[in-house]
């Protein structure tokens, strides 16, 4: 097992090496140019669309429900532990490169969402299915690449979207509250089953409540930290920017990081956090009720903005403002240390732990739908119910198992998911740009209602 884990670890390092990061970031840059900086021109429109209901479109859930399902899978432990790890390994400047990655990633997320809506289909149950596997087959004419994406997605879902999340939750609860992981696993499995057996509509209902609540709680906790260190806020912010271009010298318990490390960890964690280019979020976008693909695509674009430029930013800012990043800790422990500077007793630890639990659970729900749609593409909708029961059982397995191998397999599968999806985006970038220009002309002419 040790030898297998070493092989997988090597594969993971290669899969998420500079070549993929350049491909992901380069695709975002190309699409930003093709779409004439759509993330700056139409961000406010996308945010407003999130809270509107289409009256004459087709779909299974609302704009908001589709976005919350995608955010449920995207806003996860990475927003707490991932940012802290990037800062611990690359210095505070890594947060700046997460911002840069997100800005270009918004154009990528729009393009994924657009293609998902344009090439979605109705399954035998009368529900919509879409995502990279469908636009690879129907748009690019490469069914084999669609099959590859679905295979990689199905495997990745059980790892990063299921067992890794339940394991992280069980460990956090055991450490803070002393509750046995077996008990945590049972509770998580039962709660997951109660939600996902109801399909996308119930997932959307639960995530539409859970995601805003958990984000608000974490936001309020971070605001308390910022306000109690308000005099250091500007210096903390300038630290994020200055270190982005200089690297970070060794100080305190921090070992130091070269500029190349700062950029690498910032870009990698940014991509991992918001999943732009990975191909997962468009699966949820395809279920949205809308009368034009561009509308839900704009809503999908706001997911990257909310995930990285808002939620991750709060984590990065409090780490820099409180100066705890020089202490040598990493991951969740570093975020807890930052919160502990402003909350009495164990309150800081409890708030971060609550964030970990809710973020992880929401990720389990969102990724269950992603994996389900990948399996449906491969084997048909008749296997979906069986898949859901298997998913629930693996939630329990993840809570009680040791997952080093699963982590590495998940990393490799996630990287492999991104490749066919990026091929589709690059292959159809002109189509996306042309049809977005047509949509903007229709808006100007009034032939398409902006909000209905």
Image (cartoon, helix red, strand yellow):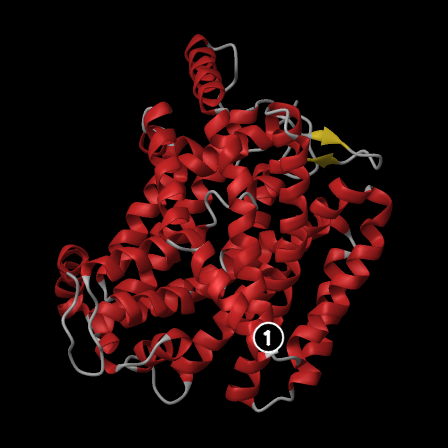
Residue 261 in the image, given as x and y percentages of width and height: 26, 61
Which residue is tagged 1?
Answer: 403
- The residue at 55%/73% (across/down) is 5
Q: Is residue 274 left or right of residue 149?
A: left
> Viewer-proximal residue, 140 or 293?
140
- The residue at 84%/34% (across/down) is 124
Q: Is 316 situated above or below 25? A: below
Q: Residues within 10 Å of mark 1 (few under 14, many from 20)?
A: some
Name the quadrant containing residue 358: bottom right
- The residue at 59%/32% (across/down) is 116
Residue 188 in the image, given as x and y percentages of width and height: 68, 72
Residue 12 in the image, given as x and y percentages of width and height: 49, 61
Name the quadrant containing residue 367: bottom right
- The residue at 46%/80% (across/down) is 350
Q: Is 244 situated above or below 326? A: above
> Viewer-proximal residue, 279 or 124?
279
Q: Is residue 384 left or right of residue 187?
A: right
Residue 292 in the image, given as x and y percentages of width and height: 57, 22
Q: Is residue 297 visible?
A: no
Q: Is residue 185 left or right of residue 84?
A: right
Q: Is 2 situated above or below 311? A: below
Where, quadrant-wise, is the N terminus in this rendering? bottom right
């Amino acid at each position: 097992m040790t030898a297998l884990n070493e092989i997988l670890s090597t594969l993971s390092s290669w899969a998420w090496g500079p070549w993929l990061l350049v491909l992901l970031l380069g695709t975002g840059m190309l699409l930003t140019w093709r779409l004439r900086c759509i993330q700056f021109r139409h961000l406010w429109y996308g945010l407003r669309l999130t809270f509107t209901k289409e009256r004459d479109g087709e779909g299974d859930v609302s704009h908001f429900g589709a976005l919350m399902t995608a955010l449920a899978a995207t806003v996860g432990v990475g927003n707490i532990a991932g940012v802290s790890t990037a800062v611990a390994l690359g210095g505070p400047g890594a947060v700046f490169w997460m911002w840069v990655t997100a800005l270009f990633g918004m154009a990528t997320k729009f393009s994924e969402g657009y293609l998902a809506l344009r090439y979605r289909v109705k399954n035998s149950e009368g529900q919509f299915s879409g995502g990279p596997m469908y636009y690879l087959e129907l748009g690019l004419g490469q069914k084999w690449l669609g099959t590859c994406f679905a295979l990689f997605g199905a495997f990745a879902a059980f790892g990063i979207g299921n067992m890794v999340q339940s394991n992280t939750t069980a460990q956090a609860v055991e450490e803070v509250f002393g509750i046995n992981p077996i008990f945590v696993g049972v509770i998580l499995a039962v709660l997951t089953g109660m939600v996902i057996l109801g399909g996308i509509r119930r997932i959307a209902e639960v995530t539409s409540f859970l995601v805003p609540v958990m984000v608000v709680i974490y936001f309020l906790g971070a605001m308390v930290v910022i306000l109690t260190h308000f005099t250091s806020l500007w210096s903390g912010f300038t630290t994020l920017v200055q270190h982005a271009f200089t690297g970070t010298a060794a100080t305190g318990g921090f070992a130091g990081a070269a500029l190349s490390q700062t950029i690498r960890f910032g870009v990698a964690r940014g991509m991992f956090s918001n999943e732009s280019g990975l191909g997962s979020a468009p699966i949820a976008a395809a279920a949205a009720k809308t009368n034009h693909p561009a509308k839900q695509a704009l809503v999908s674009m706001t997911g990257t903005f909310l995930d990285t430029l808002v939620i991750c930013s709060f984590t990065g800012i409090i780490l820099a403002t409180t100066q705890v990043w020089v202490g040598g800790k990493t991951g969740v422990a570093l975020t807890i240390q930052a919160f502990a500077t402003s909350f009495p007793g164990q309150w800081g630890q409890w708030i971060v732990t609550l964030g970990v639990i809710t973020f992880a659970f929401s990720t389990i729900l969102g990724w269950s739908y992603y994996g389900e749609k990948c399996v449906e593409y491969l084997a048909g909708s008749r296997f979906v119910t069986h898949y859901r029961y298997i998913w629930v059982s693996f939630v329990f397995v993840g809570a009680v198992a040791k997952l080093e191998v699963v982590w590495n397999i998940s990393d490799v599968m996630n990287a492999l998911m991104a490749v066919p999806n990026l091929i589709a985006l690059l292959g159809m970038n002109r189509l996306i740009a042309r049809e977005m220009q047509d949509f903007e002309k229709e808006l100007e002419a009034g032939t398409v209602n902006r909000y209905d």
